[in-house]
Amino acid sequence: MSRFQISEEEYEAIKQAEKETNDKNVSRRLRVLMLRHEGYKVREVAKMVGMRLNSISQLCQRYREQGLEEFKRNKYTSHRRALPVEQEEEILSRFEEAAKAGHEVTAQEIKAAFDEVRGKDTGRGYIYALLRRHGWRKVMPRPKHPKAASEEACEASKKLSKVYWKREKTCPRNRKDACD
C-alpha cells in the first residue's frame, strides 16, 4: 500500500485543479500527487514525469503541510530586475512624452538614462527586454514607398532615418495589470 494517502474528495479536487491550470509546472506537480494516490511508487512517478526521487517525496510532503490552494500557487517567478517596476515606468514616461510628440526615441538614449539612474552600465539585452516588458515596440521606416514611381519619390517619402521606439496602444502580452 502506498504511504501517500489522500481522500477521494481531495483526489477529485487535485484532478480538477490540474485540468484548470495553464501552468505546466503546476500541472506537473499536481500530476505527481495524482499518480502517487493511484498507487505508483516514487521511482515510477519520477520516470513518468521526469523528476528526481527526492523531489517527488518533497512535493508530497509539501502538499500535506500546505494544502491544495497554497500548493498549486506558482511561487517561482523571476524578478531579476535592476530597478523596481515603478522606477522603470518613471524613466520610460519621460521618453513616452517625446515619442507621442513624434520625436525619435532610441534604445541608446533610454539605456543612457537607465544607466544614469542605476549608477552602472546595463547590457543592451536588458534594455530591449525592459522595453518589451513595458509594451514598447520597434518602429522603422519603409525602405521604399509602395506606390512610388521613381527613386526620387522614394527618398522624399522617407520620414525617419533611424530606428526608434514607440509605446504600443494595446496591452502587452505579459503585463495584464498595465491595461487596467
Image (spheres, grey):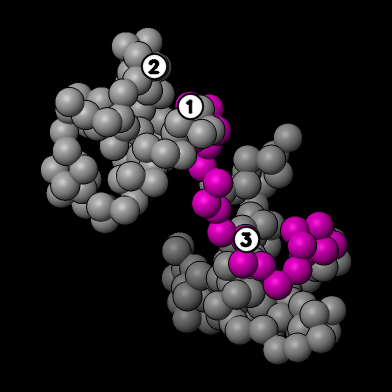
Q: Is residue 15 above or below residue 104?
A: above
Marking on residue 79:
3
Q: Is residue 92 magenta?
A: no
Instruction: Return the residue nearer the eye: 72 or 157.
Output: 72
Query: Label 1's element?
Result: helix
Instruction: Return the residue nearer the eye: 67 or 119.
Output: 67
- Residue located at (17% from left, 38% from top): 41
Q: Residue 61 appears at what percent x and percent y?
A: 42, 39
Query: Label 2's element?
Result: helix
Q: CA distance from mark 1 to mark 3?
A: 25 Å
Q: Is residue 165 above or below residue 4?
A: below
Q: Which residues are magenta?
A: 68-90
Q: CA distance from mark 3 to mark 2?
A: 33 Å
Q: Is residue 167 above or below residue 69?
A: below
Q: Residue 102 appears at what percent x and percent y?
A: 77, 65
Residue 32 visible in image: yes
Q: Which residue is mark 1?
A: 68
Q: The C terminus appears in which quarter of the rendering?
A: top right
Label 3 sits on what residue type? His
Q: Which residue is mark 2?
A: 10
Label 1 sits on what residue type? Leu
Label 2 sits on what residue type? Glu
- Residue located at (75% from left, 68% from top): 83
Q: Nearer the viewer's eye, disc 1 or disc 3?
A: 1
Marking on residue 103:
none
Query: Label 3's element?
Result: loop
Q: Is residue 76 magenta?
A: yes
Q: Are marks 2 and 1 in contact (CB under 8 Å)?
A: yes
